[in-house]
Amino acid sequence: MAHVKRGMTAHARHRKVLQLAKGFRGRSSTCFRPALERLEKAWQYAYRDRRVKKREMRALWIQRINAAVRDLGMKYSTFMHNLKNAKISLDRKILAKLAIENPEMFNGIVSQANGDLKPKKSPTRKTSAKAEVA
């Protein structure tokens, strides 16, 4: 049976791990075992924080909407309730963006949600005189 040298595979794997661990502090960037442990922990944090990021962004949008609505003398919860009752379906991301970048449009949405601006009715069709007589 032929003699098989396996150093190349292990060396390649170690090199790949150490390349990924660049920038870590201390032995974690130069020694394979601590580097691998740190990388695994980093991947756990990355997995978790991809979900946490979504929560934090939603909280930020809510804070921005709340600040913009409070300037208009209303609370966030009241505004969102009025939006739902007015059947205006805009998500918090869009509302927060409007509050910052286009305050006039945001004020219009707030007043629509309050019922200050009545939506215009579509013109009704005029009935003929014959239909009224009959």
Image (cartoon, rainbow, N blue to C red):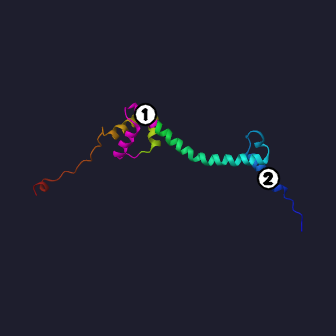
Where 4 sits versus 90, above or below?
Answer: below
Image quadrant holding the C terminus, namely: bottom left
- For mark 1, what is the residue? 68
Quadrant of the image occupied by residue 27: top right
- For mark 2, what is the residue? 12
Q: Position of residue 15 (x, y in %)?
A: 78, 49
Q: CA distance from mark 1 to mark 2?
A: 55 Å
Q: Position of residue 110 (x, y in %)?
A: 37, 38
Q: Main secondary structure of the magenta part?
A: helix
* Image label count: 2
Amino acid type of the residue tagged 2 in the rendering: Ala
Q: Position of residue 73 (x, y in %)?
A: 37, 32
Question: Which is nearer the N-term, disc 1 or disc 2?
Answer: 2
Q: Residue furthest left?
A: 133
What range of the chain is rendered magenta?
64-89
Q: Which residue is more in the foreground, 96 or 50? A: 50
User: Label 1 neighbourhood size at 10 Å, few (<14), some (14-19), many (20+)?
Assistant: many
Task: Check disc 2 and report its element: helix, strand or loop.
Answer: helix
Amino acid type of the residue tagged 1 in the rendering: Ala
Q: Position of residue 2 (x, y in %)?
A: 89, 66
- Side (left or right) of 99 relative to 122: right
Quadrant of the image occupied by residue 53: top right
User: Label 2 neighbourhood size at 10 Å, few (<14), some (14-19), many (20+)?
Assistant: few
Residue 64 visible to an observer of this rendering: yes
Q: Residue furthest bottom?
A: 1
Q: What residue is rendered at 66% in x and 48% in y?
A: 43
Q: What residue is rendered at 45% in x and 43% in y?
A: 92
Q: Mark number for residue 13? A: none
